Image (cartoon, grey):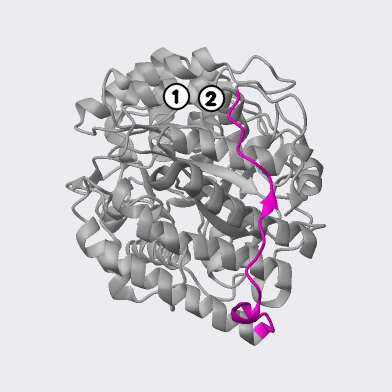
Amino acid sequence: MARIVLTADETLTSTYHDVPLLDFLGCAPYDKLPKWIYALLDSQLSDENGVLIQAPYGLRKVEAALLRDGFEREEVVVAHPRAVERFIDEKTTVVALYEMDPLGLGPVSMMFTNGGQWVNYTSVKFRELVTRINRVRELKGLKFKLVVGGPGAWQLDFRRETREKLRIDHVVIGEVDHIAGELFRDIESGTADETIMVRSWPKVEEIPTIVAPSYKGLVEVMRGCGRGCRFCEPNLRVARYMPPERVEDEIRLNISAGIDHAWLHSEDIFLYRVEDRKNFYPNAEAVVDLFEVARKYTKNVNPTHGAVAGALAVPDMIARISEIVGAGPNHWIGIQVGFETASPELIGRYMNNKMKPFSPEEWPWVLLNGTYVLNKNYWFPAYTTILGLPGDNDDYEIMTARLIVTMEHELEERLGRRAHFTVTPLSFVPMGLLRDREFYKIDDMITYGQFLHLYYAWKHLMREIARGLPSVMRNNPFLIPFYPLARLGAHVLLRQIEKWGKKKGYNVMRLDPLEGLRVDVEEHRWYGTPRLAEAY
């Protein structure tokens, strides 16, 4: 039993058999993806008498902040969602949930659920957890407060009627590291607002070091970004860099718990301790030093996110990191990267720092050449694009599809089996400085150009599942049952996209093959003049 019970829905406590990018499985539609397939792919974190041995990183930060702020160890528990009832009794004052996508309104979910017309697994599992917690509260007549925070908490403020129906007492939006103790005591005393908007940001010294192992060995190396993309909440926050010694402390803690991996989390790893805030030229020495620190403990070192422009700006940095962690044909470095659009006009309008130190006009060229640099050094970028950006048109969307075609052809021609990337289109979600815009609903709003963008991205993904999945999962025994299932699933999905497109009037089987863009791979250290993308 505990005074403060911290947990998350079970889509956030599944390891998904360590299959790359399968962490997004929870975004799949509940009534479309068979339950037996989800159950097969789900693999929950271990617990000890209901207490999570590893836990989502956000929960670990709140836990550490509460302990720092005067709560006793026995008063705070990080519970497995399937065992949360064990820790709730009359002594419990707060049950707090850390959530990423509680109502399925995130960009990935909105794409997979036809603009929110279907229910996804994250929202089902969230509602199941809340229902169970409320049942305990009702049956035992308890007075604790049910609180939801985390990156997805905004969804419950956006859908207040759902929040009231679920009997959620407080929603916390923002970073709480510096005020966790005060905030929880205000909730306990009944003086906190129903929606708690934390408008200040903690300084680096106010962000605590985790005190127990984190999910998959995740450690935070920086917070915020600084590039200022208008659609992105994290990129609008002030950038803060964790000192290498703190990063090392957290890696050491995870390694001592038997986690042979270090995921270096940031919004853009290549901006770690950046000094050039005008052109965003990477501080390559600091980035390399960070990987050297992590490599002292494990060879399984991966960044979570990065910008392709940073990789292209300093190719030697990428090569050096690959050398440090021993990247090669049997050891790929995965990284999530924002592709967004091939349109120089849109990238300049909404993301005018994303391509720096290059120019918006060079963006298609940056994507091709940056991917070349990454692939050459055994990095596997998983790109995301955006369907329905305000102001887009079919020319911009077709340009994106054509660049995917060019990248596939040019990289395979130059690098052979070393050429790998994926592109996953996501629905535009009104966030950041564009929060007053409209949600993109694919079934109602899809245009011809957007369909080509979607189709060629998924067509390439099907190719990558066949070519790339065995490489990145070479040492994972789950590859044996998963590989044929993934190939079949990708093939079925592509056929369904073709049928859906035909129904919408976009019959790709009758179209001529899509031409690529005239953009070339140029292997130099620095590129001074714009390389404009033109049609062949």
Mark 1 and mark 2 residues within 8 Å of each other at the beta carbon: yes
- Foreground residue among 9 and 266: 266
In this view, 135 is above or below 189 = below
- Foreground residue among 87 and 505: 505
Locate residue 376, reporting x and y percent.
45, 34
Chief SS of the magenta region:
loop
Task: Identify residue for label 1.
Answer: 319
Task: Identify residue for label 2.
Answer: 315
Asked which quadrant contains residue 200, the reply is top right
Q: In the figure, is residue 459 to the left or right of 4?
A: right
How would you rate the neighbour count of disc 2 (Cα within 10 Å): few for under 14, some for 14-19, many for 20 or more? many
In this view, 384 is above or below 266 = below
Locate residue 436, reporting x and y percent.
79, 55
Secondary structure found at label 1: helix
Locate residue 274, reporting x and y percent.
61, 18
Picture residue at 50% right of the left edge, 14% below the top: 286
Asked if the stretch drawn in magenta spans residue 511, the answer is yes
Please, what is the three-letter code of the amino acid marked with disc 1? Ala
Secondary structure found at label 2: helix
Residue 110 visible somewhere in the drawing? no
Q: In the figure, is residue 300 to the left or right of 372?
A: left
The quarter of the image holding the C terminus is bottom right
Please, what is the three-letter code of the amino acid marked with disc 2? Pro
Picture residue at 69% right of the left edge, 36% below the top: 354
Asked if the stretch drawn in magenta spans residue 199, the answer is no
Find the distance from the CA under tag 1 to the CA under tag 2. Answer: 6 Å
Give, as a single range, the part of the protein colored magenta: 504-524
Q: In the figure, is residue 303 to the left or right of 480?
A: right
